[in-house]
Amino acid sequence: MNQFDLTVINFLNRFSRHSWTFDNTLLFISENHLIKGAVLIVILWWGWYRPNKNQLCIRIHIISTILGCFLAMAIAKSLVVLLPFRPRPLHNEGLDILLPYGMKPSDFESATSLPSDHAALFFALSAGMFFISRGAGILAIVYATLFIAFPRVYLGLHYPTDIFLGAGIGIAVCLLCNMTVFNENVSRPISGWSDSRPELFYPAFFLISYQIADIFESSRDLFWSTYITLRAIIT
């Protein structure tokens, strides 16, 4: 483990179990999708309908950002499989950390720590807010740092470098997807459907934004349940 991760983890762990309320509040925040993703999605929808002389351009950037979220999540999940397994801090016996109230040693035991898919997804989404307005972008980045990244480090679910790698992936992918060539060739045609086929566009827009807020958890559960069922039928 690098010295930076060790220093941050040990510093934060000094506050563990000092307050049942504080520990459990962070645990609740880390598990509640309404607090995590839904707040950022509300900002996204606000940007979509906010009256602005550049509204069409902003909507194109919003679509690019949503597509970037999908791509960032896919890259993060691929790296989870490809990179060597890294035990989470709460499972690292060498750290000998004191688990916060509410955390169990068995939590996420089989899941690798690197990179943070939460950071990849929500920092991609937050970076896209800058194309709505600078204020929205700053608010989103600060919110993602305090309510998504920080609790996961404090609770021992990730090392700081897991967060930095995930956030770097998310921001980089979002910026690439918001380049002019992508906007004009991919996002602009999609944005046209909001006028030509609103009865199809907006239900899809709602469903996709809901899944982002849900961290694609429902989609993943549906996929694996279907896979297991089909496998059982076939075999």
Image (cartoon, grey):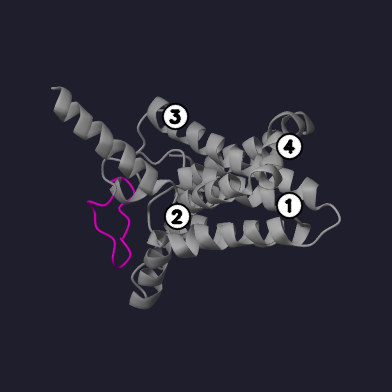
Q: Quadrant of the N terminus?
A: top left
Alpha-carbon span between mark 3 and mark 2: 22 Å
Image coordinates of residue 147 in percent, x first then y, are 51, 62
- Span colored in magenta: 92-107
Image coordinates of residue 230 in percent, x first then y, are 22, 29
Residue type highlighted by circle 4: Arg
Foreground: 45 or 162?
45
Q: Nearer the viewer, mark 1 or mark 2?
A: 1
Which label was assigned to residue 188?
Answer: 4
Quarter of the rendering containing residue 45 = bottom right
Foreground: 224 or 85?
224
In contact (CB < 8 Å): disc 3 and disc 2: no
Whether residue 87 is visible, yes or no, is no
The residue at 79%/33% (across/down) is: 180
The disc, 4 or 1, on the residue closer to the chain's N-terminal end is 1
Foreground: 60 or 175?
60
Q: Which residue is mark 2?
A: 153
Q: Which residue is mark 1?
A: 130
The disc, 4 or 2, on the residue closer to the chain's N-terminal end is 2
Alpha-carbon span between mark 4 and mark 2: 38 Å
What number of labels is visible?
4
**Vertical side of 207 occupied by 228: above or below:** above
The disc, 3 or 1, on the residue closer to the chain's N-terminal end is 3
Q: Which residue is mark 3?
A: 78
